[in-house]
Amino acid sequence: MRIKRFKELLEDVGDKYAEKKFNIPPKFTEFDKLYRRKYNNIGQEVVYKDKEEGLIILKNPGTLDSVGPGVRGIIDTKGNFFVEQDSTLTHNPIINILWKLGIIKSPDESWHIKPPNNFITVQRRGDEIKIGESNSWYDHNIPNSILIFQDFLDKAKKKNPGIIFINKSVLNRNF
């Protein structure tokens, strides 16, 4: 099983490189997106849907089966996990959508360089959810930041027991 996941990861990296470097779309991208959109309502709450952009934000999906690779998300102070179904946005637009919906408080303009008190950003890496790249400073500059993030992650684990939350930056390549 581990070899299969590693192989999928390598193929995904190659597909992403070909897409960015040579503008070659991954083989199954459209199929995967259509499949996830068709089956996304099985026990999952959709908090935002934009048909034009193909953007869907789920709340507490339970598992990562219905979300794509590399997706970004937000965990609020109550441990609710909001995640895009397919990787289409950076954290800022997701934060603004959740703020406009009244789900999170108005974000401070410098939210990415201060200790979190309203939400944290996370990102999928393989079968795990890790601290988002927009918080890459978290284990370097602020004392006790790992403990602050752990509090958010522990609450999210309680609401989403089928998802593995890891208190490491998604930029940490030692996974």
Image (spheres, helix red, strand yellow):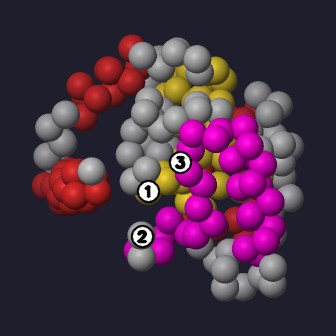
The x, y position of residue 61, in whole percent, is 58, 31
**Residue corresponding to mark 2:** 175
Position of 163 relative to 148 (above/below): above
Q: Residue at x 72, y 85 (%)?
A: 141
* Residue 154 placement, left or right of 67: right
Q: Residue at x 86, y 58 (%)?
A: 117
Position of 168 relative to 152 (above/below): below
**Residue corresponding to mark 3:** 72
Classify mark 1: residues with Cα within 10 Å, few (<14), some (14-19) or many (20+). Answer: many
Callout 1 secondary element:
strand
Q: Which mark is residue 117?
A: none
* Magenta-highlighted residues: 145-173
Amino acid carrying mark 3 in the image: Arg
Q: Residue furthest front?
A: 1
Mark 3–mark 1 Cα distance, whole angstroms, equals 10 Å
Mark 3 against mark 1, which lies toward the viewer?
1
The x, y position of residue 64, in whole percent, is 48, 38
Callout 2 secondary element:
loop
Q: Which mark is residue 125?
A: 1
